[in-house]
Image (cartoon, rainbow, N blue to C red):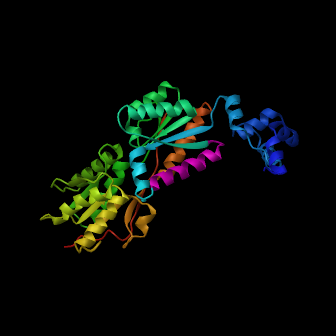
């Protein structure tokens, strides 16, 4: 049974807040909706009244009043996300995405919703179409590989819904937020070359991901820049531990195994560590290793892993902030580059003479 306090809280209206704060209903509404043009002292008085009365804004009423839904929808790859959850591996990308998006939305009085959409041609469009029709979000965030699917972006444009694409960089008709993937791979490669490595292999993810293709390009470019003429060794591990292990096993059994490996995500980097141990190779004494992602597990490996830290939370936060700005009538299209960090730990060392 509900308590009397709960009943009182449910009955508090925006008019009650306005009376206590000594302002108009419209001014209270602007503060609740995080609108500009409210003096700081007035805003503080209204927020104090909201706190004192325990007022909770009704989302449906907010939507009806201003034409906005106060919802941002983030879309992720269904198959890969579910696979990681079912295998008990967790999903740091999703964790960081929710952290960055939810905290930024909360700051603006918005809510972040999370949907899984398939990547099969046609199916993803139907699923996204159904989701936006049901939820009517103010903006949608497409994460890789959905951000590479121009059909989904076109669907949102047709519906008049602002779209943010993670990993894209054009910014002409959408909000694009990206990390310099090619630049990060080139910096990692130069780090290894600086340690004397010449036989460097790149363990790529899914070629359907534009970010993975850019990293391979950055790797090849840095090798060419250093004058390393042999065709760089590139294998596809599909972002998967078992697939990566098969590729690395072939490399380590070859007549000329690499002295350093760059892995496109942490799961594949863990596979490299397992195979190195199985072959009796010391890391970094006989094999250096760098990973992309920098999930918490790489700091607990033995030895702790050198990695590129992806600014996932920050990218999603920027996407949310810009989509919310669009819902308020500000400019919609632009591209935003977010800096990465190369965290040098203990899995990279000088090449063995």
| Residue at the front extreme of this rendering | 1
- The location of residue 96, given as percent across then percent down, is 50, 53
Q: Does residue 84 lie above or below 20 as drawn?
A: below
Q: Is residue 48 left or right of residue 99?
A: right
Q: Is residue 23 left or right of residue 120?
A: right
Report the residue at 31% width, 42% height from top.
208
| Residue at the top extreme of this rendering | 158
- Residue 198 appears in the figure: no
Which secondary structure is most common in the magenta stretch? helix
Report the residue at 21% width, 52% height from top.
224
Q: Does residue 113 lie above or below 192 as drawn?
A: above
Q: Hey, which quadrant is residue 35 in on the image?
A: top right
Q: Which residues are magenta?
A: 91-110
Which is more toward the observer, 311 or 236?
A: 236
- The location of residue 2, given as percent across then percent down, is 79, 49
Report the residue at 40% width, 43% height from top.
144
- Residue 242 appears in the figure: yes
> The C terminus is located in which quarter?
bottom left
Examine the structure image and report whether residue 146 is included in the region drawn in magenta: no
């Amino acid at each position: 049974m509900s308590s009397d306090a709960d009943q009182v809280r449910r009955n508090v209206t925006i008019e009650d807040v306005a009376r206590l704060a000594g302002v108009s209903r419209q001014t209270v509404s602007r503060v609740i909706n995080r609108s500009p043009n409210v003096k700081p002292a007035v805003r503080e008085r209204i927020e104090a009244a909201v706190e004192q009365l325990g007022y909770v804004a009704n989302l449906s009423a907010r939507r009806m009043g201003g034409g906005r839904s106060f919802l941002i929808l983030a879309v992720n790859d269904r198959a890969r996300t579910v696979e990681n959850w079912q295998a008990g591996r967790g999903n740091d990308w999703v964790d960081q995405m929710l952290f960055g998006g939810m905290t930024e939305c909360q700051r603006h009085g918005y809510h972040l919703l999370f949907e899984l959409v398939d990547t099969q041609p046609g199916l993803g469009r139907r699923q996204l179409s159904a989701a936006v029709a049901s939820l009517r979000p103010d903006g949608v965030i497409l994460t890789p590989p959905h951000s590479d699917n121009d059909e989904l972006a076109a669907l949102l444009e047709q519906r008049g819904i602002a779209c943010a694409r993670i990993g894209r960089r054009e910014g002409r008709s959408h909000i694009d937020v990206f990390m310099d993937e090619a630049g990060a791979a080139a910096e990692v490669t130069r780090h290894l070359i600086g340690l004397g490595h010449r036989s460097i292999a790149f363990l790529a993810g899914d070629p359907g991901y534009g970010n993975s293709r850019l990293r391979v390009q950055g790797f090849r470019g840095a090798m060419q820049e250093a004058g390393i003429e042999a065709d760089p060794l590139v294998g596809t591990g599909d972002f998967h531990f078992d697939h990566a292990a098969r590729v690395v096993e072939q490399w380590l059994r070859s007549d000329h195994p690499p002295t350093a490996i760059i892995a496109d995500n942490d799961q594949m980097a863990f596979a490299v560590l397992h195979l190195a141990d199985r072959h009796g190779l010391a890391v970094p004494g006989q094999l250096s290793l760098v990973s992309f992602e920098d999930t918490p597990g790489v700091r607990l490996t033995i030895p702790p892993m050198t990695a590129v830290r992806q600014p996932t939370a920050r990218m999603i936060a920027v996407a949310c902030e810009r989509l919310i700005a669009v819902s308020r009538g500000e400019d919609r299209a632009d591209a935003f580059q977010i800096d990465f960090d190369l965290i040098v730990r203990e899995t990279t060392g000088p090449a063995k003479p």
